[in-house]
Image (cartoon, helix red, strand yellow):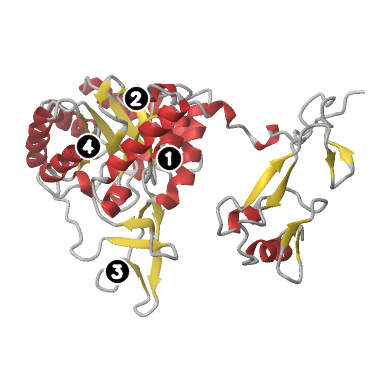
Amino acid sequence: MADLTTNFLGIKSPNPFWLASAPPTDKEYNVRRAFEAGWGGVVWKTLGSEGPPVVNVNGPRYGAIYGADRRLLGLNNIELITDRPLQTNLDEIKRVKADYPDRAMIVSIMVPCEEQAWKDILPRVQETGADGIELNFGCPHGMSERGMGAAVGQVPEYIEMVTRWCKQYYDKPVIVKLTPNITDIRKPAAAAMRGGADAVSLINTINSITSVNLDTMSPEPSIDGKGSHGGYCGPAVKPIALSMVSEIARHPDTHGLPISGIGGVTTWRDAAEYISLGCGNVQVCTAAMTYGFKIVQEMISGLSQWMDEKGYTSVEQVVGRAVPNVTDWQYLNLNYVAKAKISQDDCIKCGRCYAACEDTSHQAIAMSADRTFTVIDEECVACNLCVDVCPVENCITMEAMEPGQVDPRTGKVVQKDYANWTTHPNNPGAVAAE
């Protein structure tokens, strides 16, 4: 069977599934339950300094976005870092790590952007025996207004500076958690590398307002008639996270930087996708909050079975395998041709493919009097909108044409039309060779 053991920055854990820094990792009781359920590691909910106390709201802390079946697609939170005493957290971390030495224990930290504040807290964290720290440079609400969280993560110079402090005063792995609320994720990742970071984790939550109560005219969650922006997470953010992870994994300035992937991991397949794009492990929050800690058991069994089927014997063999296939649009093969095909045996005659294509695409699907739907090959441009809107999985498929076949759109043989261009035809300045 596949070995799911991971060795991330020298930190061993029995599987690549870690709980992210969030309410599920706020105290000893929760973390012990998580480890008993099978999680490979945890990132303890963010600790702060012993300065002004952190006070969370006592009203609703979450807003939600649902699918048609009320499946939770996205979660917005306005919760701050831990509001429990620092020493209480440190004592609990030490006890849990002692009892579960085979599990990864990472401590998330957020203190003022001052060298002394980091110098004070790091030795105390070191004494717990935790395996490493994660610098929370991502929280977009509450703490960022105090000059922490995303306020640091949006300034590469601050990231580099604080990371250097932590590497100076702490001798175990330092992971920098990046904010997605930035134009180019590669710049803060490169800054973390310059500061000596051992790894980055991403993405933290996305700045958001999920909804507005149209009776009270206040954003949700509403606190006494007022609302605030918060951090958005859950399955809906996964595409954004995957893109940012891939940008770091393939860019020359950050290539080879270890990555812990975060954002909407709900199934083993989500985890495999993150790992294939360069992540050494994944962190999970919303899925655990939605379904409970035992969801990790499905993730473990699913990933293990998939790896067995594919012939992978270790997680390390999967890490980064998809990265070489991530490219810029201008390098895509313009000679690749595919056509939509509708399986009449599977079609339920709902007409969604026809409506979508007729009204908003290329009028490439015909409907007969008895509601039989067929593809008009000469009009099909392979956009695959019909595949995406069809409610029956695999009823509509995209079939690639082999070189030498006749393209029904043009009546020409499929061939490499651009083989003689000195540079790619989508690049400015490309010219055809004589």
> Residue 209 appears in which quarter of the rendering?
bottom left
Residue 27 at x, y percent in the picture: 13, 44
Question: According to the image, label 3 marks what residue?
Answer: 222
Question: According to the image, label 4 marks what residue?
Answer: 38
Which residue corresponds to the image point at 64% horizontal and 48% vertical from the top-left? 397
Per the image, label 2 sits on a secondary structure element best described as loop
Question: According to the image, label 2 marks what residue?
Answer: 1
* Eye-nearest disc, 1 or 2: 2
Asked if residue 108 can be seen in this view, the reply is no
Residue 344 at x, y percent in the picture: 67, 57
Per the image, label 4 sits on a secondary structure element best described as loop
Residue type marked 4: Gly
* Eye-nearest disc, 3 or 4: 4
Q: Residues within 10 Å of mark 3 (few under 14, many from 20)?
A: some
Residue most extreme to the bottom? 215
Question: According to the image, label 1 marks what residue?
Answer: 269
Q: Earlier in the sequence, mark 3 or mark 1?
A: 3
Which residue corresponds to the image point at 75% horizontal and 36% vertical from the top-left? 334
Residue type marked 3: Ser
In this orientation, which residue lies closer to the viewer: 237 or 311? 311
**Distance CA(mark 4)–CA(mark 2):** 18 Å
Q: Residues within 10 Å of mark 1 (few under 14, many from 20)?
A: some
**Distance CA(mark 1)–CA(mark 2):** 18 Å
Q: Is residue 128 above or below residue 45?
A: above
**Distance CA(mark 3)–CA(mark 1):** 35 Å
